[in-house]
Each structure stands twice: as C-alpha cells, then as structure tokens.
Amino acid sequence: MPYLDHAATTPMLPEAIAALSAALGELGNASSLHGSGRRARRRVEESREQLASALGARPSEIVFTAGGTEADNLAVKGIYWARRDADPRRRRIVASSIEHHAVMDAVDWLVTHEGAEVSWLPVDEHGTIAPGALRAVLAEDPDSVALVTVMWANNEVGTVAPVAELAAVAHEFGVPLHTDAVQAVGALPVDFAACGADALTMTGHKLGGAYGAGALLLRRDVDCVPLLHGGGQERDVRSGTLDVPGAVGLAAATSLAVERRSRLAPRIAVLRDSLVRGMRETVPDVILNGHPTQRLPGIAHLSFPGCEGDSLLMLLDARGIECSTGSACSAGVAQPSHVLIAMGASTAQARGSLRFSLGHTSTAEDVSAVLDAIGPVVERARRAGLTSVVS
Amino acid sequence: MIASGAPLKVLAAMSGGVDSAVAAARAVDAGHDVTGVHLALSAAPQTLRHGARGCCTLEDANDARRAADVLGIPFYIWDLAERFRADVIDDFVSEYAAGRTPNPCLRCNEKIKFSAVLDRALALGFDAVVTGHHARLDAGRLRRSVDMDKDQSYVLAVLTARQLAHAQFPLGDSTKTQVRAEAAARGLAVAGKPDSHDVCFIPDGDTRGFLERQLGEREGPIVDADSGAVVGSHRGSFGFTVGQRRGLHLERPSPGGQPRYVLSIAPKTNTVVVGRGDLLDADEVIADRPLWTSGIAPTDAFDCAVQLRAHGMVSPATVRVSAHDVVARLHHPQRGVAPGQALVMYDGDVVLGSATIAAARRADVRA
C-alpha cells in the first residue's frame, strides 16, 4: 500500500523494534540502587550517550521526554518561566508564525494564563524566516524577551529555517533560542552544538523509533522550570520514572537514522522530485508550496486549485494511497493551515492542499501509484468543488 | 432511480446517533460499498460533554467514528460549518426576525444533507446518500415511517424527485424500539444514546435567548386583539410563535380570565398581538414555494391530508394550486398555524409535496 505520510509517522526500523523489545524484557527502575537498578541506569546512560553523539550534544544535555509535544511544552513554558522569574521584565516570546501547534498553543497558553506577550515572526511566501526580521523584533526591546522559538524544518511545507543564523541573532541580544527539530532530525544534518540553539526538540517516531519517546536537548547553562514535579529525574527538569526501553529504542533509531541520512536523503529527494515533476505533467496548474531549495528531502506539499484537500485525500485513500492534508485537525475537521495562510496563501488554496511525505521505506512504485491515480482524482475532486466554502 | 438490490457506492451520513449508525449498518448488509461521513456543522465543536443534545459535538463525532469502526467502513469528517451557518442558522434567525417560525431540520435536509452533501457525494463518485431518517422511500415515493411517533417524512417533504432518487432511508420499515434493539445486537455503543430533540445549534434549548444574542433585545408592546390595549411588553417580537401561550408574562389578565395566545406578530412595529384561542382557528392556509415530490404540479384542485407542523395532527383539506402558491381549505379549522412552518400534503402515508406557510385565516372573516 503506497504510504506517503512519513511526516505523520514513519515505519519503525527493525533494529529499533529489536532494541526496544529486548529492553522491555529487562527488569529495573533506573533510580534504584541495587543491581537491577544499576543495569537499568546503565542502559539509560548508554542510550543518552548514543543519542547525544548522534546529535552533536553532550550526554548531560539530553532530557528524555514522552515525545515532541512534551519537549516543546517543556522548552517554551519552562524557559519562559525561568527567564521571567530571573527578571520580571522578560514577558515576551518571539515565535515564528509557522510553528507546530505544540509550540504555538503553548505560547498562546502562556499569553492567556501567564501574562506573556508574543511577537509572531512573519515568513515570506516560501515559509522562510529572515534573520533580519528577528533582529528587528529583538532590537526594539531586548530586555523584554524571554525566549525565541523557531522550528528547524516545517512539518507541513518542509521549508528549512536558517537556525544557526537565527540563534546567532538571538545571542547578540542575550536571548536563548529553542528550535523544534522534530522533522529535521534524520532528514537534515542536525548538530546541537554547531547550530547554537539553546534547546532543541526531537522525537523518535518521525525517524523510525517508537511513539511516546523523545527528548529535549537543553544546554546546561539554560534554566528551565519543570512541567512535571516528582522524583527529580533528568536534572530535576523532568520527573518521572525513566522509560528505559523508550530511551533504548529512541537512541537505537536515532543513531541509525542519522548514520543512514547521507545516503537516504538524496534517494528520497530524487523520489520527491519525480513525484513533483509527474504531478506537474498530470495537473498543470498544481502549485508546489515551500522553499524551492531550502527544504526537507521528503516533503512535497501541493495545492490543487478548485479542489478540497478533504476530497482529494478521501479519493486517494479509497485507492489505497495514504497522504495528508497537512494541517492540524480539530475534531477531525481540517482547519485551513496557519502555515499556508502565514505564507500568504488564500483560504481556498490552503484548503485545497495535500502533503505527500516520503521516508525510508518509500519506493519508485509508491510515486508511480500516486501519479497513476492523481489525474482522475483531481478531476473528480474539482467537480465536487469547494463544498465547505460559501461562495 | 436506484435499482433495488444492485450494490452501490453510498455515503452514510453518521451523526453519532443510533439511527444513522443502524442505517449505515443496514446499507453494509445490503451489500453496498459504504463510506461513513460525519458532518461537522459547528465551527467551534464543544469539548466532551455528557448526554447528546446537539448533533455537532466532539463526542458525537467520536461516537460516529466508533460506529464506523464496528461496521468496518472508512470514515471521514466533512466540515460544513460555513454552509450550515449561511443556509440554516442565518435563515433561522432572519425567519424569526420576520415574524415567522422556521423549521431548521427541514432547511438542513433541503440545503445541507441533500444538497451540499449529496452534490459533493455525487461528484466524488457516490450513487446515493444514506441517512437514518424515519421515512420510507418506495419507488420514488416518500412515505411515512411505520413508526408514527418517529416519522420524519415532514422534514423530508422539501426534497425534490432528483434528491430522493439519490437518497436511501433504510429505517422506514422499523420502529425506534427495533432500531435500538438492533444497534445493541450489533454491538454499537450508541444503542442506548438518548435521542436529540432540540435545535442542534441551540444546545441549551433557549431559542429566545439565542435569538436575542443574534438580533439584540428590542423592547416592544404586547397588544390585546379585542381591546387594542397594551397588556404587556416583550424583548423582541422575534421571540414568539403564532399559537404560543406560555412565556407571555402578561401584566393584565383577560376580562373573562381565559388564556390568551399569540395571534400575530408584526416585526415592523415590533408588536405581538394576543387574544382568545378561538381567534387562532383557521380553515384556509396559504403557502408558497410549493414543491411536488413527483416533480409534476397538479393542475386541478384535489383532496388530501395536510400536516402543518412537525409532529402535528393531519387534517383533511382541499388544495388549490396556482403558479406561485397553494391554498389549502381545511375541512375542519386548525388552531395555531404558524407562518414559516411547512405545509406538507399527504395521500394516506405518501408525501405529495410541501410548501411554506405564508398566512392562515378564517375564510368567513376574510378581510
């Protein structure tokens, strides 16, 4: 079955399943002082070292979490609280306008409940954040800023942000920067130390690991107030009995994904390019969204004028082809993507879009299956028109 | 026309209630290729709450999804909130503002389920839309359900022959009790879910409060029809229905102590006229926008049974048809015929057509 939704989640690597399964059979609370505890702790620490080494970080900078959303919330809220507590003037969060909801909604929550203010950084028509725009916002009143958060690679359109440049700008003003790198790790070279970010979110299930295991990479000199209070695990930043198998599986998957990236990414990019090329031949008015070069290898985000993304998805699904409308769901209802709207697209264009995302199991056959189906599917969806929009 | 027995590609509209779940199940059993769709009609779905009084809560969407899982059919949510707002809610508000009493379920069937949804379904390659309405479709004729208490032919009587040709109502031959028992036997968790009664977009049931929020309060007089005296005040004439007795809060009792009813509503002067119940008796109903289920308008006057509101009594009548309206002469006067409601004409249990009530009067006191 052609699965073109790897950005939602990608099949687990067999090696990660093996590592995780083996660890599930082992006894031990990593905080216990006896033999089993020490063995569990050893597996956690080896995983921490393995993960750190794959991502250019120090082991002590890894905070294991239950996935990307938790890591984003911990970074945004935790750093905001710590910085504000240190200096009450620091109430402003500077965030890009194309963040994932895990960041965007955490920021909104701080605005509603914690008296935070937010500056949403604009993006251009490709979804790129200009370092100059960040500098302009920070220069206005740097003392009021608690943190900057910008996503490394956008989950919908795949545009890659100049994270190192943005981090350098933030540091000119002494402001820490968090980056959500959930889509970037395994697809792009990600080096925590080299990129200059102070905090970085990653998760396992986007790169061949299991659900529910991720990490926040957090520099030692960045204070972060915990979301979860308890036993004081993970530098007192993230309490909770350590998920030993989760850490083992995450480290196994991440180190393999990072190791294989330099061969896999170009192969996926070739498939993606053939998908886009074929799409343009079959549907001449299709629009490719995102940056033409600074983008993830596996994502092709396309707008089909006159179609509802919902209709396209349903018709492809009926043919066994799985993709995404690429936008967040509320009660299963696709809202027009805030990312495309921020990039200047109309509501109709935003609603008439599909995200095809390729990954480590993608093949040329997957691409041809989509290209074989898309002509009649678009024709039919066009006939159905834009039902949800009142003309 | 849909040939019976031939497997079709059908779209089952699944509200999250028991009826639409069983209807979808029966479509599956009939061998059709069924896809379930939940219509999201509210732009801001409520968070989980208990009971089911609306048709567009998150809980309802989840119930519909779980029913689709049990039936093993694909399931999607279609966002029709904007269309619903424009075609049903705005229409509801403006009808009340004009002194009429609309039926939003009927409007939703006409404009959403068998228009926006059906059109989209047909364009996407489906042959028909399946719903859990209690009504029968019999060789293109729309008939009442065998369960008179649950019969919904009244709110479907606005459908054209073309719309009915692409509709399936698998529940028309069953009673509600049978439907619930079947749902339980099929392992559908919604088997015991309470029926929805209220207007789905007014979950608290307070229609007047809803209209006040939409239209703003406008204080005006309540006038007695006999004496012309002001006997009370109201916060907006839109909050009333002809024939209404409760909630008038009159300051002065009637001379004879008899109850008073809303006789008419004058939105231009924001006046509500009240009076004796017998003044509500009407034997002639004028209704416009006639629609004939067969697609063919009768040329001669004919006798039939008319129903003048949902769950209302039927009365024998003689109907005359003109170009733009129908005039039904009721053989026995009816009380409280409200403009805006549908006049639905039946031959026995077969729907002949419908029209929107514009006025009702006593033929012998015609002005």
Image (tube, coloured by chain):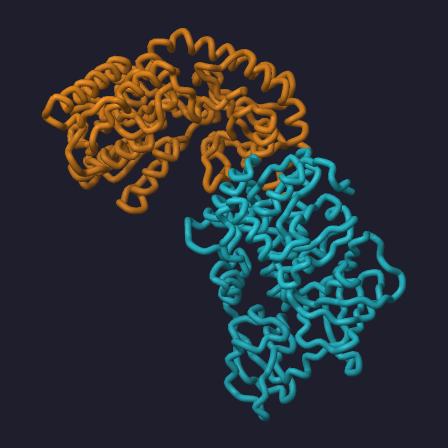
Chain colours: A orange, B cyan
Q: Is residue A165 left or right of residue A84?
A: right
Q: Is residue B260 left or right of residue A236?
A: right
In this rendering, is residue A149 above or below B328?
above
| Residue at 61% over, 29% down | A315
Give the image location of residue A56, x and y in percent.
Answer: 25, 14
Q: Is residue A87 visible?
A: no
The one nearer the camera, B255 or B237, is B255
Residue found at the very far left of the displayed protein: A33
Q: Is residue A286 visible?
A: yes
| Residue at 32% over, 38% down | A107
The one nearer the camera, B302 or B322, is B302
| Residue at 78% over, 42% down | B1
Give the image location of residue B81, x and y in percent.
Answer: 55, 47
Residue found at the very far top of the displayed protein: A263
In this rendering, is residue B237 above or below B128?
below
Label total for image: 0
The one nearer the camera, B156 or A117, is B156
| Quarter residue B242 falls in | bottom right
Residue found at the very far right of the displayed protein: B300
